[in-house]
Amino acid sequence: AAATRWRRRAAAIGGAMPGADEDPGAVGTAAGDASPEPEVVFYERDERIRRFGIDCGSELLWRNGTWQPGGEFCKTLNVKNVGNETIRLKYKPPKGSFFSMDFPEAKTLSPGMSMPVRVVFRPVRLEPYDDYVEFVIKNRKLKWTFFIPVRATLSRVAVDVPESVDFGFAPIAEDTVRHLEVHSIGTAPVEYRWQVNAPFSIEPSSGVITDKQVFEVHFKPRQASVFVSKALFHAKDLDRSPVLFKMSGIGKYPFVALSEERVDFEECFPGESAEREVVLRNQSVVPATFSIAREESDVLPVYSVEPTHGVVLPGDFVALRVAFTPRALGQFSCDHFLIKTPGG
């Protein structure tokens, strides 16, 4: 719903202004009838325009740092009739003594006319303040009521940190990354630092969050085992610091196998090139990062293998192209290539 409901008094009146969209859930009150105390409902701007044909700001807010006890701080709310009918508008000042307004007088607003409403804030203590202004709209037959909050806030550090991340199976000696979003849900920036134990790490490890921060959570196991750890999110001025963040993962060795371990090209003439295909298959439950290199480097190569590196997903395979290009007639050539994975 577009309305934020703060139930401070029982009963309600409402309705849609003539010329605005009708709302079957709202009922108007005859202008001459005695009405019950209205329910305090704070509507979003678009919803207020739709229901009442009135456009104004959603609230009057004094943020931390813009006010201090003993001072006088003023803000003006501009109330505009965006409907298609002339109305009478009157307000009731906030009930508390910290927000004050001029003596309320009813004013006639034709379509398109505006009415400035001035609110004076006089705080006496450094603490949050919360109140509202009640507006009453009348035409020839009905009347409606809506409310605008007036607030003064202090800086408050608050964050939304997910509870956990699970890496599942991850290859030994390889860096597996997951992403984590932390949101600042308070009114002040969050100055933070992470405290994390290996084989996990989080980047960036420290900084300031003003809105949200996307972190990289790394898992690099060194052995085949189950790992469970808790990272500590330390935040300055946070009520409950540190915040716990759980991380878990299982280290697994990758296992790759070739469709054939020996390739025989038999006879091939110099200047020509022969090719064979060998399949490298990953038979493990984790991705396998591989690299291929010649074992002998003291002689000119006549064999080549492509690709020389890559990643094979669990249960998947990659085709390796093995090429032989002899350099001399009648020469026997033999070479060895080693396929490695970071986990061994």
Image: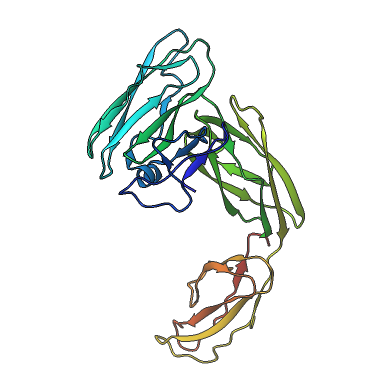
**Residue occupying the point 35% across, 21% down:** 75
User: Where is residue 1 drawn, in percent x and y?
Assistant: 49, 48
Can you see residue 136?
A: yes
User: Where is residue 85 drawn, in percent x and y?
Assistant: 26, 43
- Where residue 296 sits, quadrant-wise, is bottom right
**Residue occupying the point 52% across, 80% down:** 322
Q: Nearer the viewer, residue 277 or 94?
A: 94
For residue 91, side relative to residue 165 (left or right): left
User: Where is residue 299 drawn, in percent x and y?
Assistant: 51, 71
Can you see residue 172?
A: no
For residue 100, side relative to residue 209 (left or right): left
User: Where is residue 29 drawn, in percent x and y?
Assistant: 43, 41
Above/below status of 136 relative to 170: above
The outermost residue toward the right is 225
For residue 106, side relative to residue 112 (left or right): right
The outermost residue toward the top is 70
The outermost residue toward the bottom is 267
* Quadrant of image for the C terminus: bottom right
Q: Nearer the viewer, residue 172 or 333?
A: 172
